[in-house]
Image (cartoon, grey):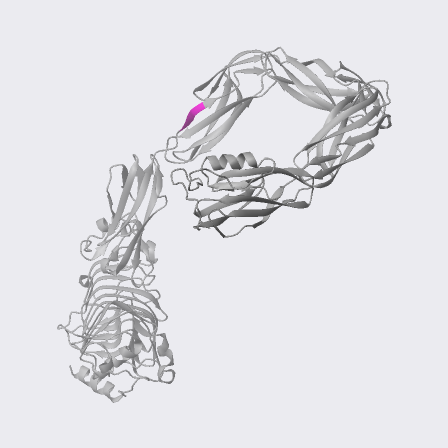
C-alpha cells in the first residue's frame, strides 16, 4: 500500500491539464448527464467534452469518425481525458457504436490513453475503438493508462507506442471482461491487455503484434493475497511475445493459445494453470504448462470434445478453426454455391462469422442447421437435394443466424413430344424433312442426342439443349436413294411411313403461236401445254427458241397427274421468217414484217359535237405485206392516251374505228398511231344551247279587271342556235306558252298581256326548260260593274254574263287563256307582242 501511495504521488507531479481546440460545451449536447438522461455524443469534439464533467453519464448516438483529431492542439491530437489522480468516474456506453481513428501524439508526455485514469466508479462498455494511434514516452493503454473501474464488451484496434504499453491499459486494477484487442504494441514492456494486471480478466481476446519482448495478456500478476490477478476464457493470437499468457500468474484458466512463442504459457506453478490448450502444430512451440493437442483436436467439432474445460454452452463456440468467444461474433452470413440444385446433387454451404478484432472465420462444419423440408439434407456444410421443392436452410452459431432459400429442381429429362413430316410420298433423291419438337419435362436445362432412324438405321443425328420446362423445334433430314416404303422414327416417337417413288417426268406436249405475220417490235404470245402423268408434283424447264436463238427458259411446276399451261412472249427485232419451238415442240412459223410495211393514209373525225356527246374517229391503215400482220394501234385525244388496241391488218387498206366522249369545249385533236406512222383529225366541241330568263318586268299593283303586261329577256348562252319553249304561269297555272328561236350568244324580248279579275296577290313566272324568274302582282278593288263570282272565282258582269278580256291572242296563247278563264283563274290573256 505504501508503494501504491508513492506511485500516486509521483504521477501527480507530472499532471498538466490541457484543453482541446474548438471546445464544445456540455450544455450544447443532448441530455443532462444523468443515468436516465445521459449526454449523447455524436462527434469527436463532444467526446472531448467529457473532460468538463468526468462523473456524468454518456452514450454514443452514432459511429464517430475522429480522424480529424490528428490536427488538434498543434498536432498533439486528442487530449487524454482526466489526470492520473483525477480520472473518469462516470459511464460511457457506446451502444455498439464505434470511434474510428482517434489520435494522441505527445512525445515527451509520461501518460497516454483516451482516458488517463478510469476510477473505480467509472465504466466503459459496448464500444469499439478502431485504428487508435497513441504515442507517448511513458505509460499508455489503448483505452486508458490506468483502469480501476470496469471495461466490458469493448474492442480496441490500432497502435500504441510507449515505454510500458497495453492494448487496453498500462495497469489494470479493475475488471476487464469481454474485451478484444488487435493492437500493434511498440514498447519494451507490453502486453495484449495490460503489462500489470491486478484484477480478474474474463473472456478476452488478444490479437495484433508485439514489436518487442512482451506477453500475450499481461506481464505481471499481483501476488498480493487480496487480489485475484486471474485470466479466464481468453484466446491469445498475438505474435512475437515472450509468453502467450504471462511471465507469471496467479491463475490462468480456460485459455486457447494460437501464437508462436517460446513459452506459450508462463506460470508460477502447475496449479495456476487450468484448461489452457495449445498445439505445437499450430504455434510451432511447446510449453511446460497447459494441455498440448493436435491441430485436429483444437479445431472443428473435435475441439468441444478435447477442450472439455471450456464452456461451449455460454462462452465458447466451435468453428472450422480454433474456438472463439461467443461475444466476439458480430454477424453471421450463410452462402450456398448453387441456389438451384438438381435432385440427387449437392452443393456446399459456407458459414462466415464476422469477428471483433480479428479476421472473419468460418463455422461451416460446426454451425447448427435447420431445414424446413424433408426434401433435402445437410451434413458438414454439404446440402443435398433428395426431392423437388424449396428449402429454407438456416445456419445458427451462438445466437446469430442467417437463412437462404434453395430451389431443388427436377433433373433435365428430354424427350420427343412430336415428330411429323409432310412428305408421305417423295421422289427418290429428294430430301425428306422431319419436324421434331423436343421437350424438357425437368426443371433444369439439359441436352441430349436424338437420332432419325429409317427402318432402324440412323440417317441423321443432332444434340439438342432445352431449358427446363421448355420445348425446342429441330429438323432432321434424309435423302432416300432407293424406291420403296420406309418407317421413320425419332427417339421413341414414330414419325410414320414414307413411300419413295421415281421422280416425276413432266414434258411439253403442245406449243402454238397465233400470229402468222408480226410487225417488227410487236410482242407475240406462245402458249405451251405441259403434262405430268406421275403421282408427284414435278417441274420441267421449258425453253422457247426462235430460229436459233433461245428467247426464255423457265421452270414450270405441274401438279400430279394433271396438265398445265405456260405462256411465253417473243418480240422480233429484225424482219424475217422465224420457226418457234418449246423444248423442240413446234409452235409455228411467224413472218416478222418491217414496220415500214404499215402506213397511215387518213384520219377522219366528227366535225362538230356537243359536250357530253361521242365523237367517232376512223383511221385508214395500209398493210403493204402480202399476209395479215398483227400490230397495235394507239389512239389519243389532245395527247391524252385513250386506248391501245391489238389488230390484225389484212393486206391492203384497213379501217380502224375509235370513239370517245368529249367533255370540254374547243377543238379536240385526235391522234392515231401505228408502227412508225401517225395521223390526226379535229372535232369542234361546243356547249349545247341554254336559255336563261332575265330582266322580268311587270307592275307591282293593278286594279282588278285591269290589263297587265309582263315582259322578260330570253338569252341563249350556249354555243349553238336553239329553240326554247317559254311558259308563263299565274299562281302556278300555265296561262300561255310559246316556242322561240334564239341564235347562239343572242337574246330576244318576250311579253304577255292579260287581265286580273280577282283581288289579292298573284304570283307569276316566266320559265324556260333551263331557267325561270318569278314575282308578284297585287290586284286591288276598283269601281266596276263587274262583281267577282265568289263561287267560281271567275269574272262576271252585273248581268251575270262571263267575259274575257282581250280580243285577240297570238299563236298558242288563245286556247290556254280561254281555258284558264273557264276554270276560274280570274285572268284573261292577250298577246301584245309575239314571243
| Frontmost residue, 343 versus 166 | 343
Residue 429 lies, with reference to residue 131, above or below; the image says above
Residue 237 shown left or right of residue 464 in the figure: left
Residue 157, image quadrant? bottom left
| Frontmost residue, 150 versus 50 | 50
Residue 136 shown left or right of residue 587 in the figure: left
Residue 360, how many percent across, how many down?
33, 57
Residue 726, how many percent across, how many down?
59, 40
Task: For the C terminus, give its image quadrant.
Answer: top right
Residue 64 seen from this side: yes
| Frontmost residue, 93 versus 397 | 93
Residue 531 shown left or right of residue 225 in the figure: right
Residue 693, image quadrant? top right
Give, as a single range, the part of the protein colored magenta.
414-418
Residue 790, how many percent across, how many down?
38, 41
Residue 582 lies, with reference to residue 140, above or below; the image says above
Q: Residue furthest left?
A: 226
Task: For the N terminus, give its image quadrant.
Answer: bottom left
| Frontmost residue, 465 versus 155 | 465
Residue 601 lies, with reference to residue 3, above or below; the image says above
Which residue: 86% across, 28% down? 596
Residue 610 lies, with reference to residue 551, above or below; the image says below
Which residue: 19% across, 76% down? 31
Q: Is residue 43 magenta?
A: no
Residue 106 seen from this side: no
Amino acid at each position: 500500500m505504501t508503494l501504491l501511495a508513492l506511485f500516486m504521488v509521483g504521477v501527480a507531479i507530472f499532471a498538466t491539464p490541457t484543453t482541446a481546440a474548438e471546445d464544445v460545451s456540455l450544455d450544447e449536447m443532448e441530455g443532462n448527464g444523468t443515468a436516465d438522461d445521459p449526454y449523447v455524443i455524436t462527434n469527436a469534439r463532444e467526446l472531448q467534452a467529457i473532460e468538463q464533467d468526468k462523473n456524468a453519464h454518456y452514450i454514443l448516438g452514432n459511429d464517430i469518425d475522429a480522424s480529424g483529431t490528428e490536427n488538434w492542439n498543434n498536432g498533439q491530437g486528442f487530449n487524454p481525458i482526466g489526470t492520473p489522480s483525477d480520472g473518469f468516474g462516470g459511464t460511457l456506453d457506446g451502444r455498439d457504436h464505434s470511434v474510428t481513428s482517434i489520435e494522441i501524439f505527445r512525445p515527451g508526455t509520461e501518460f497516454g490513453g483516451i482516458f488517463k485514469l478510469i476510477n473505480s466508479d467509472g465504466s466503459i462498455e459496448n464500444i469499439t475503438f478502431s485504428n487508435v494511434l497513441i504515442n507517448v514516452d511513458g505509460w499508455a493503454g489503448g483505452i486508458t493508462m490506468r483502469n480501476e473501474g470496469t471495461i466490458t464488451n469493448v474492442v480496441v484496434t490500432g497502435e500504441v507506442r510507449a515505454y510500458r504499453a497495453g492494448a487496453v491499459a498500462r495497469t489494470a486494477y479493475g475488471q476487464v471482461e469481454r474485451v478484444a484487442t488487435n493492437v500493434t504494441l511498440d514498447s519494451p514492456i507490453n502486453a495484449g491487455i495490460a503489462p500489470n494486471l491486478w484484477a480478474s480478466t474474463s473472456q478476452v481476446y488478444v490479437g495484433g503484434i508485439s514489436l518487442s519482448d512482451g506477453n500475450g495478456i499481461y506481464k505481471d500478476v499481483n501476488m498480493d493475497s487480496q487480489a485475484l490477478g486471474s485470466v479466464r476464457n481468453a484466446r491469445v493470437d498475438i505474435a512475437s511475445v515472450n509468453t502467450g499468457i504471462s511471465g507469471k500468474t496467479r491463475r490462468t484458466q480456460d485459455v486457447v493459445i494460437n501464437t508462436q512463442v517460446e513459452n506459450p504459457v508462463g506460470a508460477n506453478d502447475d496449479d495456476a494453470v487450468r484448461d489452457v490448450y495449445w498445439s505445437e502444430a499450430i504455434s510451432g512451440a511447446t510449453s511446460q504448462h497447459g494441455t498440448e493437442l493436435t491441430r485436429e483436436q483444437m479445431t472443428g467439432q473435435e475441439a468441444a470434445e478435447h477442450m472439455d474445460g471450456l464452456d461451449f454452452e455460454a462462452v465458447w463456440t466451435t468453428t472450422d478453426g480454433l474456438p472463439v468467444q461467443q461475444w466476439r461474433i458480430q454477424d453471421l452470413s450463410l452462402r450456398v454455391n448453387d441456389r438451384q440444385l438438381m435432385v440427387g446433387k449437392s452443393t456446399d454451404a459456407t458459414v462466415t462469422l464476422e469477428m471483433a478484432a480479428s479476421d472473419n472465420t468460418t463455422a461451416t462444419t460446426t454451425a447448427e442447421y435447420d431445414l424446413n423440408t424433408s426434401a433435402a439434407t445437410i451434413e458438414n456444410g454439404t446440402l443435398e437435394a433428395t426431392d423437388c421443392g424449396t428449402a429454407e436452410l438456416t445456419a445458427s452459431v451462438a445466437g446469430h443466424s442467417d437463412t437462404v432459400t434453395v430451389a431443388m429442381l427436377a433433373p433435365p429429362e428430354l424427350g420427343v413430344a412430336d415428330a411429323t413430316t409432310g412428305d408421305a410420298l417423295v421422289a427418290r433423291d429428294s430430301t425428306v424433312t422431319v419436324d421434331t419438337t423436343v421437350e424438357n419435362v425437368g426443371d433444369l436445362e439439359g441436352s441430349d442426342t436424338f437420332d432419325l432412324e429409317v427402318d432402324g438405321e440412323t440417317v441423321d443425328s443432332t444434340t439438342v439443349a432445352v431449358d427446363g420446362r421448355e420445348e425446342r423445334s429441330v429438323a432432321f433430314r434424309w435423302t432416300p436413294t432407293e424406291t420403296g416404303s420406309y418407317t421413320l422414327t425419332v427417339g421413341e416417337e414414330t414419325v410414320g411411313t414414307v413411300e419413295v417413288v421415281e421422280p416425276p417426268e413432266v414434258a411439253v406436249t403442245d406449243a402454238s403461236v397465233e400470229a402468222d405475220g408480226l410487225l417488227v417490235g410487236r410482242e407475240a404470245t406462245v402458249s405451251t401445254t405441259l403434262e405430268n402423268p406421275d403421282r408427284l408434283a414435278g417441274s420441267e424447264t421449258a425453253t422457247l427458241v426462235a430460229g436459233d436463238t433461245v428467247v426464255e427458259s423457265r421452270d414450270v411446276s405441274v401438279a400430279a397427274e394433271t396438265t398445265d399451261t405456260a405462256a411465253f412472249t417473243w418480240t422480233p427485232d429484225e424482219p424475217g421468217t422465224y420457226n418457234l419451238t418449246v423444248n423442240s415442240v413446234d409452235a409455228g412459223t411467224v413472218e416478222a414484217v418491217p414496220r415500214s410495211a404499215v402506213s397511215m393514209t387518213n384520219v377522219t373525225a366528227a366535225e362538230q359535237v356537243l359536250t357530253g356527246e361521242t365523237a367517232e374517229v376512223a383511221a385508214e391503215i395500209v398493210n403493204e405485206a402480202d399476209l395479215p400482220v398483227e400490230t397495235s394501234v394507239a389512239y389519243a385525244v389532245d395527247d391524252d392516251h385513250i386506248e391501245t388496241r391489238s389488230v390484225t391488218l389484212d393486206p391492203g387498206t384497213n379501217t380502224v374505228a375509235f370513239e370517245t366522249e368529249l367533255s370540254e369545249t374547243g377543238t379536240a385533236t385526235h391522234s392515231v398511231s401505228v408502227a412508225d406512222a401517225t395521223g390526226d383529225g379535229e372535232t369542234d366541241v361546243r356547249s349545247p344551247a341554254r336559255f336563261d330568263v332575265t330582266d322580268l318586268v311587270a307592275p307591282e299593283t293593278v286594279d282588278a279587271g285591269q290589263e297587265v303586261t309582263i315582259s322578260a329577256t330570253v338569252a341563249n348562252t350556249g354555243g349553238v342556235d336553239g329553240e326554247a319553249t317559254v311558259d308563263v304561269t299565274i299562281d302556278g297555272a300555265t296561262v300561255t306558252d310559246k316556242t322561240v328561236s334564239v341564235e347562239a350568244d343572242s337574246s330576244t324580248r318576250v311579253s304577255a298581256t292579260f287581265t286580273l279579275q280577282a283581288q289579292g296577290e298573284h304570283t307569276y313566272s316566266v320559265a324556260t326548260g333551263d331557267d325561270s324568274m318569278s314575282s308578284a302582282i297585287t290586284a286591288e278593288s276598283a269601281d266596276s260593274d263587274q262583281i267577282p263570282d265568289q263561287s267560281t272565282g271567275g269574272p262576271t258582269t252585273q248581268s251575270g254574263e262571263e267575259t274575257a278580256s282581250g280580243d285577240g291572242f297570238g299563236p298558242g296563247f288563245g286556247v290556254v287563256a280561254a281555258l284558264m278563264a273557264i276554270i276560274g283563274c280570274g285572268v284573261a290573256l292577250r298577246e301584245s307582242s309575239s314571243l
